[in-house]
Amino acid sequence: MKGARKIKASSKLSIRGKHNSTKMYQMIPWESTLERDFIKLLDFDPTVVSFKFQPEQINFIYKGKQRKYYPDFLVERNDFEKYIYEVKAFEKIEEDINKLKFQVGIKFCSERNMKYVVVTEKDIRKGFLIENLDVLSEVRQESTSSTVMSEVIRIMEALGGKAKIATLKEKIKPISDGEAENNIYYLIYTHQLSMDLISIPINDESIVERMSN
């Protein structure tokens, strides 16, 4: 599905691009690196069913002139709720034009049984989360093995549901270190294993846990 606004080619003064969404299986446009990082969170969040970039055009009046507002993302979650997310740098949320957009967005959503949420870098870029997601999302399913992943899960359960990545690599030999890592990382990214992705960069000393069913 296409968004409400046609994305223009970027100029030398703007930062725009597209992110290959692991959830939507398509390139999702972004107009700031903060929006790009938010897409990474949406891809990883297991409660997010689908999302769409700039899905709606909202008309409003500002200083006597007709304006158009395109909220950043429409997100559908597994609670059957729909959310409109506006991604904004924290230093800009108190600007008059943005406060007006937020009010317009809240009204728009309340009339359509949706929820309006403003998120900033404080919500998105927590610790090492984005950096760790970049590492984990590089592993595609085709580079994994269901047999190896089943063995990882078996080992985790034998170890009481918690282990260092290095321990798992050691116990699932003789496969290569890289192959073991790919399968472990994929299990983390798909929420079959969990770990603290915020406090430290992912490494062999990271502790992973078995997700409960």
Image (cartoon, rainbow, N blue to C red):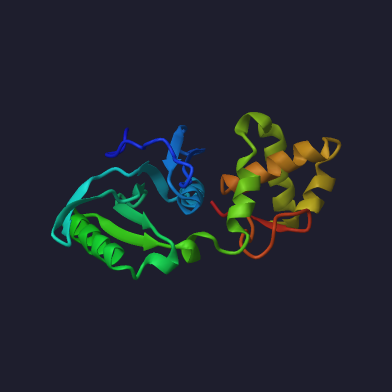
Left or right of 139? Residue 20 is left
**Side of 194 relative to 164 (left or right):** left
**Residue 193 makes an appearance in the image:** no
Q: Is residue 38 left or right of residue 78?
A: right
Question: Considering depth in this image, is 98 or 4 the residue closer to the camera?
Answer: 98
| Quadrant in the rendering for residue 24 | top left
Q: In this view, does 145 lie above or below 157?
A: above
Residue 114 drawn at (x, y percent)? 24, 54
Q: Relative to 88, does residue 96 appear above or below in the rendering?
A: below
Which one is in front, 145 or 19?
A: 19
Left or right: 97, with 133 as reference point: left
Asked whether 2 or 191 is in front, the reply is 2
Residue placed at 78% from the left, 49% from the top? Answer: 168
Q: Position of residue 132 (x, y in %)?
A: 64, 52
Q: In which quarter of the image is the N terminus?
A: top left
Query: Which residue is more in the foreground, 211 or 180?
Result: 180
Identified at 48% across, 40% down, the residue is: 17
The quadrant holding residue 140 is top right
Q: Which residue lies furthest to the top in this view?
A: 142
Answer above or below: position of 71 versus 124: above
- Outermost residue on the front side: it is 12
Q: Where is residue 166 in the image (x, y as percent from the top left)?
A: 81, 52
At which x and y percent is residue 156?
71, 51
Q: Is residue 48 visible?
A: yes
